[in-house]
Image (tube, helix red, strand yellow):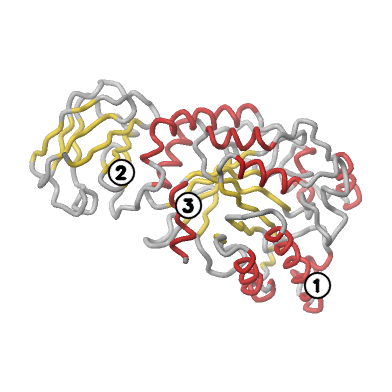
Amino acid sequence: MTSDRMAWFRQARFGMFIHWGLYSLLEKGEWIFHMEGIPDAEYQALADRFDPQSFDPRAWARLAKRAGMGYVVFTTKHHDGFCLWDTATTDFCSTKHGAKRDYVREVADAFRAEGLKVGLYYSLGDWHVPCYKAVAEGDGSQVAALRDYLHTHVRELLSNYGQIDMLWYDGAWFDDNYLTAETLGAAEMNAMARELQPHIVINPRAGTEEDFETCENECHPAPHGTDWEMCICVNDIWGYCKHDYNYKTYNQLIFQLVNCAVQGGNYLLNVGPTGDGVIPGAQAERLEAVGRWMAVHGESVRGTERLRKPFYAFGRVTRKESRVYLHAFYWPGSTMAVANLGPDVWWGENPGSIPVSARVLTTGQQAPCHWEGERLIIEGLPENPPDQADTVIVVEPV
């Protein structure tokens, strides 16, 4: 069952993370309630202002699809405790304030309609409910109340919104006090999740080993045989931050995507819509650019297998079935010599033992190639790279 439920995850390799909530109205990122010490009543009053006139989840979903993404992970509740769905546990939710809309339902329906898998982010940390802080500070008498609150949320999210493909936990701490899996009742919570959604995949941030590992902002591949995912922002701050101008370049985004894929991981790229529901132009433009690259090169990323030696002189190597993809981040000019790649890359055969053909996937140009011992020589290439971020050459047996 594990392999079956992970098949779509391995095929996708690329997903959209969305951080959006009350904090988006303040335009200073998702931690602003805590970091500025905003009084509870003042922050909670934002709920009545949460009426995003430009919110269009179908536009978000279509952008993700154009970008070449295969799934979404949407923040149902961040650490501030504001629930973006119709919950029976608290009035601090989107269906009881502002526009009185169930954003989880609208987002899930929109992405599913575009053929994308639906993941739900859920923060176990909650600055809004007193029992969370109490338990984090050692009050064992509040553990049962906290478990009931968290487990009820997970049950609601996995019972009322159709097929949910991923459960993405976060936030099991309070001021550096970490809550254990035992305190959270994580094993029982995840057993319930799998009963409600048998094909769901779950990350390990509730403290139990689950379907895949995660790393944040840096590429830390899990050991071979373990699925993993790196999450990162298009700029620096997860929630909308008006004055965060530190955007990654097109080249950086392509490199990070491919660098994850070649090492068997997924790339979860975050956008932070404004309080009015608009993905900022600088973020959308970069996703559109990545999408244009994926439209041509997607086969060299999606569903590729992890190789023992995915590095070569000019970049990275991926493989899928009978095709080997040479990702050239550092273009060699008109002739490329590919050395030091063993049988692991060349279909289990000794390098040089079988005839191959080469083609520039980026342009469709055929490229003459031959073996010199165990070195593959590819000739007739353009002097300058057709794509300055990553020109891909596909090699396959003749």
Real-space Cα separation, disc 1 to disc 2, in angstroms? 50 Å
Mark 2 lies on a secondary structure that is strand
How packed mark 1 is, by other alpha carbons closer than 10 Å (few <14, some 14-19, many 20 or more), is few
- The mark nearer the N terminus, 1 or 2, is 1
Cβ atoms at labels 2 and 3 below 8 Å apart: no
Residue drawn 59% across the image and 42% down it: 270
CA distance separating discs 2 and 3: 21 Å
C-alpha span from label 1 to label 3: 36 Å
Can see residue 175?
no
| Residue on which the image places disc 2 | 317
Residue at numbered disc 3: 8
Q: Position of residue 209 (x, y in %)?
A: 53, 69
The residue that disc 1 covers is 145
For the C terminus, give its image quadrant. top left
Where residue 324 sits: x, y (%)?
27, 43
- Can you tell which quarter of the image residue 234 is in? top right
